[in-house]
Amino acid sequence: MTLEAASPRSAIDLRVLLGATLAVVIAVLALVSLAWTPHGAASLTPLAEPDASHWIGTDAIGRDGISVLMAATLTTLLLSVFGTLASLFVGIPLGAALALRLPPTDRTARAIAMLPPALLIGMLISGLAAPANLTLFLAIALPGTVVAAITTRHVLAPLWHRDYVTAARLAGLRPLAAAQRHVLPRLLPQLAALGLELLAVAVLIEVSLSFAGLGVLSPGTSLGLMLRDAQQFMAIRPLLILVPGAVAVITSLALMLAASGLAGARHGA
């Protein structure tokens, strides 16, 4: 994940609008499940065929597929959002502190190249003897913190040494005040893009871990758990696995699309 400083006056990219709209629609439908679902917790015929009342049929214990999907999407989004926020709250200040002390070098590129195995290691470690929600939170937050810190350091260090920032500090502004006044406004679009990228990855982490049995477990529900529970019925009820999978993929792609638009705002992309 690479970021570049953008002008605070950059126009909103069409990708941001489209991606954010898709993500918001999915989030709103998920939030509606707190107050209403088409069939609530009613017990129906297990593995009933799709019809006008049950658009994707019912699951193995007789729950309406759409009702479960709405609640599952909410669980996945909440876990992803909390894990991502933790990554940003820890990683961004850490990256800023590193940028003040150590300018970026070619080691930054090597560190970024190590992130995929770091992500895998974090997922495996967090899955050892931990409650399901804590497992997912750590699997999202730990690697995300590393990504946020490295990326923030990479993008902040060049700005921190610009002439206007140096002049402000020489004029008496403390480092934190100088950063808030002259650096942070230029980084907001890029930090927002970073957050959306991490959130998109967090959704996929939840789906992957829950599908593997390391995340949410019954009687809870999430998109990953829906995929796990429905895999054995793929041949007779394909919608029970295709629809949750599509929701997870569309959500992640929408977030990445919005992030791409924010990250490319400086170049008018």
Image (spheres, rainbow, N blue to C red):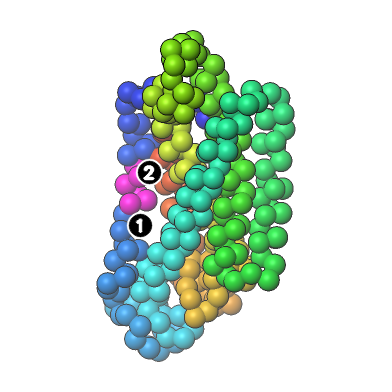
Vertical comparison of 170 with 220: above or below? above
Using residue 49 as the reference point, say whether residue 112 is left or right of it.
right
Q: Position of residue 81 (x, y in %)?
A: 45, 54
Q: Position of residue 15 (x, y in %)?
A: 38, 36
Q: Residues within 10 Å of mark 2 (few under 14, many from 20)?
A: many
Which of 218 and 56 lies nearest the eye of the viewer? 218
Q: Secondary structure at mark 2?
A: helix
Using residue 189 as the reference point, say whether residue 113 is left or right of it.
right
Q: Residue at x 66, y 61 (%)?
A: 126
Which residue is under mark 1?
26
Q: Which residues are magenta?
A: 18-24
Q: Which mark is residue 137?
A: none
Quarter placement of the N terminus: top right
Identity of the amino acid at label 2?
Gly
Which of 198 and 247 lies nearest the eye of the viewer? 198
Quarter placement of the C terminus: top left
Is the stretch drawn in magenta largely helix, strand or loop? helix
Q: Earlier in the sequence, mark 1 or mark 2?
A: 2
Q: Is residue 51 magenta?
A: no
Q: Is residue 178 visible?
A: yes
Q: Position of residue 268 (x, y in %)?
A: 39, 22
Identity of the amino acid at label 1?
Ile
Which residue is under mark 2?
19
Q: Residue furthest front?
A: 172
Q: Residue at x 54, y 16 (%)?
A: 161
Q: Is residue 19 magenta?
A: yes
Q: Residue at x 44, y 16 (%)?
A: 172
Q: Residues within 10 Å of mark 1 (few under 14, many from 20)?
A: many
Q: Residue at x 59, y 58 (%)?
A: 138
Using residue 193 as the reference point, say whether residue 158 is left or right of it.
right
